[in-house]
Amino acid sequence: MRIIRTNDNKGTTNVSFVKIMSDGESKIATTKILMLYFTPGILGLTLDNITLAGARKVALNDASYGKGSIYSLAIDDISVLDGEEVTVTITPPEGYAVDPTSLSVVVYVDDGTTDVKFLSLTADGSPGAETSVALIMKFSPGVIGLTRDNISAEGVTLGEITDVSGVGTIYSLQLKSVDVPSGSDVTVTLTNPVGYNILPLSMSCKIGVNELIIPKEGKVIGPQDDEVSLDLDRLVFEAGGVLTVKGTRFMLNAREIQMQEGQHAPYQIQIIGKDGADGAIGARGGNGAAGSDGSKNTCKLSGTEVGNAPTPGDRGQDGAMGGFGGDGGMGETNKHAELHLGKVNDTFKVMARGGIGGKGGNGGTGGNGGAGGKGGAAHFCAATIPSHPGNGGQGGDGGQGGFGGVGGKGSDGTDIDVYIGAAFEQMYAFEALEAPAGAGGAGGAGGNGGAGGSKGDHTKTPLCHDAQDGNPGSVGHKGYDGKSGDVLGKKPVIYVHKI
């Protein structure tokens, strides 16, 4: 704490220069008044007693009702920057000593800016359906004079800017291109025009692109659709993705094609005919009937001979041959396609051909052979009479498998038209192929042989001889495989038009 002596031996009053306070607000209100505080007061202080560095002194008034403890110093022409200090130096009038003689204080300078709130950023269009062509920015209050130089963006290429409100509250930013996938965020960043302080300086929104993405699993159009037309701003192929158009008239307008990084399939678009129907599978052959069982013996009780000897079981019936497989149907021709292909970022390949002939049907399996009949039983007559049961019958053979059907013919291709910009001609490759004929069907498997009949029953006596079980039937032969189709479909013609 400073001790103030009001008078010394020479009659001088010692005064403490306590502080300086300034009015104003940074960048908003310029400082106009400095308040000077003294203890005790200095009576008779004038502008001539004050030196001001960093501004011009204008007027001085005693704000302490004549006590000289608080003075109001009006200033202007501040030469320091906003937030910097000016320095007041006191040369006291006669009879006063001031300590310290100088103090500094921060002053403020109105930079003339208007605070503006960046309210919103939105995009027109719809993700996946409609490409955004403009971004809309809204401000409060308005920003007059915002130009393209004040704006940068990530994810889009900007075009012209328009003050659609006329008072700076709504601006439209035209888009030359959208450079990110549909549904992605794009960010707009601003710099302040002279006289404005915009907060925040950046904002993001979702962007829309009229695009179709072909996934790595591929996408098939048709053959249930008679005609499909696609008008796209962007056609995107994931690595491995293939667009297959099968048996459908196809119209495509793709202004941009993007090939994502990774290993791609041999063709990105293949326009093909519907494959011929596969032949029907041959019917299975019928199973053979089982052989009849043999008859048992009879006895003459008054004599010493058997009346009837037991008979063997009958052979089982052979299984029937399997049915023939049906022939494969002829492939259907591809329908006409018209492709308008634009900018592309990697080599892009298109293939066209007719439909593949249908596969011949497999032959039917042969029927199983019937089981052999059981041998006749030997009935005991007397210990002195022989007892010989009948042998079991042989099983029937399995039926032969049916023949496989013949593969169908490949269909001729229908011509297609392609329109590409001359600037991108080297990025595209086209290939027309013959449509393969269908493979022949496999011959049917032979049926299983029937089981042999079991030997007849008998009563064991010293004169009894055992019988034999019947042999099983043989497995039927496999049917012959059908022949592959021998007619390939003719190549279509791909007409490439440079535009």
Image (cartoon, helix red, strand yellow):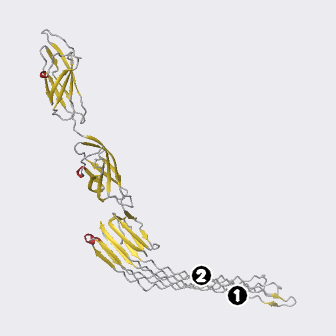
Horizontal and vertical percent position of residue 381: 83, 85
State the mark number for residue 284: 2
Above-or-below relation of 263 to 138: below
Q: Which of 266 and 109 is in front in this view?
A: 109
Q: Nearer the viewer, residue 455 or 126?
A: 126
Q: Is residue 471 visible?
A: no
Identity, as a three-letter code, of the amino acid under mark 2: Arg
Q: Distance between the residues labelled 2 and 1?
A: 25 Å
Quadrant into which the C terminus falls: bottom left
State the mark number for residue 96: none
Residue ID at (36%, 67%): 231
Above-or-below relation of 361 to 8: below
Q: Which of 260 and 336 is in front in this view?
A: 336
Residue ID at (42%, 86%): 487
Residue tagged 1: 314
Q: In this view, does 192 lie to the left or right of 395?
A: left
- Dot 1 alpha-carbon crowd within 10 angstroms: few under 14, some 14 to 19, many 20 or more: many
Q: Which residue is farthest front? A: 166
Q: Quadrant of residue 56?
A: top left
Q: Is residue 48 visible?
A: yes
Above-or-below relation of 50 to 322: above
Q: Do the residues labelled 2 and 1 touch (CB within 8 Å)?
A: no
Horizontal and vertical percent position of residue 466: 73, 84
Secondary element type, mark 1: loop
Identity, as a three-letter code, of the amino acid under mark 1: Asp
